[in-house]
Structures are given as C-alpha cells and as structure tokens.
Image (cartoon, rainbow, N blue to C red):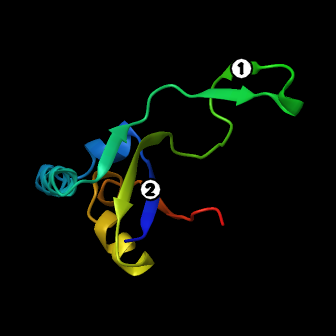
C-alpha cells in the first residue's frame, strides 16, 4: 500500500480557539490512526545537516523550511491513494484547529 509523509503546522492560538469537542474528536481520530499503525509524532527541535562532497560535516540548529505556522508534527501513513490520505488527515488536530497539513507521497527510488 502506498505511503505518505504528512507535516502538520499549527500554533497554540489556533488550537485554543477551536472548540474543545472538535479538538477532542481530532485527538481521538489521531489515536485511531496510531492504533491502525500510523507512525506519528510531535515535532522536536530540528537540526540542519550538511556534508558537501562528503568532506566536512556541518550542523546548524533550526529549521531550513519556513512557514507562517510552526511545524507541529509528522506522520507516516498508509493509504490506497492520495485522496484517501487527504481524507485521513482532514480530521487531525492541525487540520481542524486552524492549522494545515501537507501530504507528500513517499515515492520509492527506482
């Protein structure tokens, strides 16, 4: 079954202004996805890694990508297709609490 990487963006303000019942339903949905095997986690502090030409390792704290909302978490989901993956993430906390979720098809190298 195809796999998808999801990136959830959201902030505390958006979360707080979402009705508690909606937030609770979203967390229950996440729990259901995790029970079905979705690998999901909250985003920690990122580190950039570079090793140009494999001769000098460089690291820098902080994200490389930028967004108006902070990255809140990641998941690896399995779905029959992109439409099903979108449906699965449409009820997660970031999607319902004034954030956004990106869905990236995880393609295998040939």
User: Which quadrant of the figure contains the C terminus?
Assistant: bottom right
State the residue at coordinates (26%, 64%).
Answer: 91
85 left or right, relative to 56: left
Q: Nearer the viewer, residue 68 or 54?
A: 54
Give the class, few, some or many, for how many residues have Cα within 10 Å of label 1's Cα (few <14, many ≥20).
few
Residue 49 placement: quadrant = top right
Q: Is residue 102 above or below residue 86?
A: above
Find disc 2 in the rendering and name its residue: 6
Question: In the picture, residue 51 is in which quadrant?
Answer: top right
Circle 2 residues within 10 Å: few <14, some 14–19, many ≥20 = many
Q: Position of residue 95 (x, y in %)?
A: 35, 59
Question: Which residue: 32% across, 74% down?
Answer: 87
The answer to whether residue 101 is visible is no
- Asked if 19 appears above or below 87 in the picture, the reply is above
Residue at x-position 34% and y-position 39%:
41
Residue that appears at 27% across and 48% down? 17
Return the disc, 1 or 2, that comes first in the chain's sequence.
2
Using the image, determine if residue 14 lies above or below residue 44: below
Marking on residue 26: none
Q: Position of residue 75 (x, y in %)?
A: 38, 50
Near-viewer residue (35 or 9): 35
Q: Give the quadrant of the N terminus.
A: bottom left
Query: Which secondary structure, mark 2?
Result: strand
Q: Which residue is mark 1?
A: 59
Task: Provide the secondary structure element on which disc 1 rests.
Answer: strand
């Amino acid at each position: 079954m195809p796999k998808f990487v999801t990136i959830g963006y959201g902030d505390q303000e958006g979360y707080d202004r979402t009705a508690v019942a909606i937030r609770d339903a979203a967390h229950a949905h996440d729990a259901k996805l995790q029970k079905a095997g979705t690998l999901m986690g909250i985003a920690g502090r990122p580190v950039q890694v570079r090793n140009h030409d494999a001769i000098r390792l460089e690291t820098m704290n902080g994200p490389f990508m930028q967004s108006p909302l902070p990255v809140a978490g990641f998941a690896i989901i399995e779905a029959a297709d992109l439409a099903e993956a979108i449906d699965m993430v449409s009820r997660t906390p970031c999607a319902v609490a004034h954030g956004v979720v990106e869905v990236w098809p995880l393609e295998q190298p040939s």
